[in-house]
Image (cartoon, helix red, strand yellow):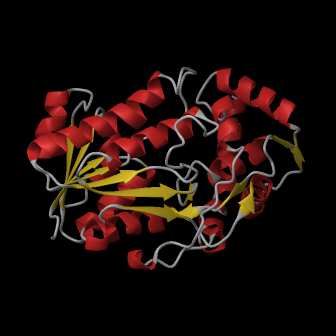
Amino acid sequence: MIHARILLVGGTGFIGSQIASRLAAMNREVVVPTRRFERARHLLPLPTVDVVEADLRDDATLAALVARADAVVNLAGILHGRKGSPWGPEFEEAHVRLPARIASACAAAGVRRLLHMSALGVQEGGEQSLPSMYLRSKTAGERVVRESGLDWTIFRPSVVFGPGDRLLNLFAQLQAWLPVIALGRAEARFQPVFVGDVARAFVNALDLPQATGTCYELAGPDVYTLRELVALAGSYSGYRRPIIGLPDALGRLQAAVLEFAPGPTLMSRDNFDTMSIDNVAGSPIAEALDIVPTPIGAVAPGYLRRAPARFAEERTRARR
């Protein structure tokens, strides 16, 4: 079955924008709901994408949007939330209740196809055993999707890189500002995946019969420690700084300080806990998805090489 009308939840973000662009290029109708229309202005030039100002916390609004679609892609997720049992209210709302409400709306509207974003490191049955609220709540969200009775596909990506990412760009910016980088969990292992490959996986799986009822791990071709990723970002941007790995006690203290610091949260204790297990795939990306994983070195130098001038401007403004 060709799915022609897709509701893209979380479609204004880093990964969602790539998926919307690819679907538009295939002449698929895409509805992207957002609470703030200005966040989706970059999607307006896409001819088959309809940006709708809507609050998906309202069940009637969600039901109406789902009823317009023949497939739903759920990308909604957060990285930070208040501490609570078993995973706090923010993670509960974004990672558990929203997938449950989407699944319920799909069932009510007769929409069978549901693609769901999870995370590498999630394990079936890990709602109690995994080390962080983030991973435990993502596991609970997966369970809701698996038990929905719908034609679901779940994706578990590693950390995602690409132009505009919050990974390598952040590491490069920190090195533009700081003379030395003190790094908690410096030896944590990751297998970063290119944003274009993640988008391609979703799009390629959408109409693929064998993708139904399947969970796919999405990871790049290479494994790096966190220390190595920070060093790469510094090298590519021209701001490579010395890196000091912190023992766990100091790393947790650093995470606590950053968690409560003013401004956007760069790191939290829950992030620190998430990094206690490797973020590495058990196998290559499934052949059925028809993807050759993109290495960091093929993409990141191009967008980080332009970073020095941008960071210099930010430094100048900060001194004013």
The residue lying at 45 percent from left, 79 percent from top is 287
Quarter of the N terminus within the rendering: bottom left
Relative to 125, is 46 above or below?
below
The residue lying at 69 percent from left, 53 percent from top is 278
Q: How far across and how far down the image is residue 255, in percent?
A: 73, 30
Quarter of the C terminus within the rendering: top right
Q: How far across and how far down the image is residue 302, in percent?
A: 61, 68
The answer to whether any part of residue 268 appears in the image is no
The quadrant in which residue 259 appears is top right
Left or right, 125 with respect to 51, comes to right
The residue lying at 58 percent from left, 70 percent from top is 283
The answer to whether any part of residue 151 appears in the image is yes
Q: Nearer the viewer, residue 50 or 67?
A: 67
The quadrant in which residue 62 appears is top left
Left or right, 88 with respect to 204, comes to right
The residue lying at 58 percent from left, 54 percent from top is 159
The quadrant in which residue 80 appears is top right
Q: How far across and how far down the image is residue 106, in percent?
A: 17, 45
